Image (tube, grey):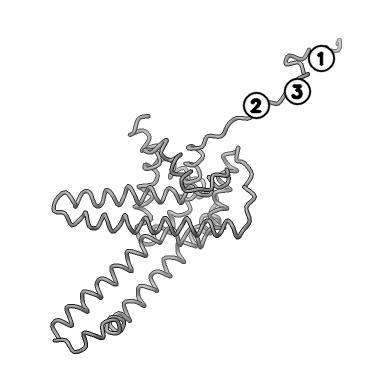
């Protein structure tokens, strides 16, 4: 397949998802609510950390109490910056996962709406609530950990002069988008009994450029504060559309009994 056409087709999937949810304004606003709640929670946590940062750093470095003022300030200043940067990093990486977890019923409803509108969706798999929640938490934690590793590696690569300034952002965008796509397609894959992350990766690999064409722009849009509030419902719908394209529905053949005649005689017409 043409990579350029596939990339633009992937972006078109996001636009199609947006068109679907905009036709349901109430559902669109409901889908934006979890992202807004997560944004406000993270902002409140960051402000709380900043307000109490001095006391927290002083508590964590009692050994520096008797140090010279210059060295004490350098140590505690570096630790303060590191704590703030680490907190922001964790929030950026975990934002999508936390939002999808908080809004799971809403986003499942959006995915179900997309399935109904496009037609041909199978019935949801019969899985107990406890098993489903445990599996979702386990998979989400794994994705967050991988995201943290990728982000740290990209940051370290970015420290390399010249070349690193290009490799770091590209790696972050590609890997971050790929992991985001794994999360956004979960509902449609689960409905079809493909419950493992490896299942999603395998089918995404069959149309890698299309998956990235959808996921990378979505990743950048979700990284913009509060823009993500409006993008999340469209991204959820787009993820369902993409999953359907990766897993095309098999048309059902008409059933015939062994004894039936494949060419039944026509019913004679009554004379006028």
- Residue 97 sits above or below residue 60 on the image: above
Disc 1 residue crowd, few under 14, some 14–19, many 20+, Cα 10 Å: few
Pick the quarter of the image with the N terminus: top left
Report whether residue 188 is seen: no
Q: Could you tell whether 69 is left or right of 185 in the image?
A: left
Q: Residue furthest right?
A: 271
- Residue 22 sits above or below residue 269 on the image: below
Q: Residue furthest bottom?
A: 66
Q: Nearer the viewer, mark 2 or mark 1?
A: 2
Q: Which element carries disc 2, helix, strand or loop?
A: loop
**Numbered mark located on residue 267 in the image:** 1
Residue at 62% x, 47% y is: 124
C-alpha span from label 3 to label 1 = 20 Å
Q: Residue furthest top?
A: 271
Report whether residue 55 is seen: yes
Which residue corresponds to mark 2? 253
């Amino acid at each position: 397949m043409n990579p350029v056409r596939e990339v633009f087709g992937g972006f078109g999937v996001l636009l199609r998802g947006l068109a679907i949810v905009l036709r349901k304004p109430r559902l669109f606003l409901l889908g934006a609510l979890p992202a807004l709640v997560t944004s406000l929670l993270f902002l409140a946590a960051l402000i709380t950390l900043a307000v109490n940062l001095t006391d927290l750093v002083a508590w964590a470095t009692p050994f520096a109490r008797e140090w010279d003022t210059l060295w004490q300030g350098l140590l505690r200043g570096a630790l303060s910056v590191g704590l703030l940067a680490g907190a922001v990093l964790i929030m950026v990486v975990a934002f999508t996962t936390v939002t999808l977890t908080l809004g799971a019923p809403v986003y499942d409803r959006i995915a179900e709406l997309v399935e109904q509108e496009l037609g041909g969706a199978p019935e949801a798999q019969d899985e107990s609530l406890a098993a489903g929640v445990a599996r979702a938490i386990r998979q989400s934690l794994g994705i967050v950990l991988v995201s943290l590793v990728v982000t740290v590696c990209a940051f370290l690569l970015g420290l390399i002069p010249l070349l690193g300034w290009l490799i770091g952002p590209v790696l972050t965008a590609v890997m971050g988008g790929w992991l985001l796509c794994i999360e956004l397609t979960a509902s449609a894959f689960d409905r079809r009994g493909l419950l493992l992350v490896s299942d999603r990766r395998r089918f995404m690999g069959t149309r890698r450029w299309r998956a990235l064409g959808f996921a990378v722009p979505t990743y950048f849009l979700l990284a913009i504060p509060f823009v993500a509030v409006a993008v999340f419902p469209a991204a959820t719908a787009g993820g369902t559309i993409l999953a359907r394209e990766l897993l095309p529905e098999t048309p059902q053949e008409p059933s015939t009994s062994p004894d039936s005649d494949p060419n039944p005689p026509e019913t004679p017409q009554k004379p006028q």
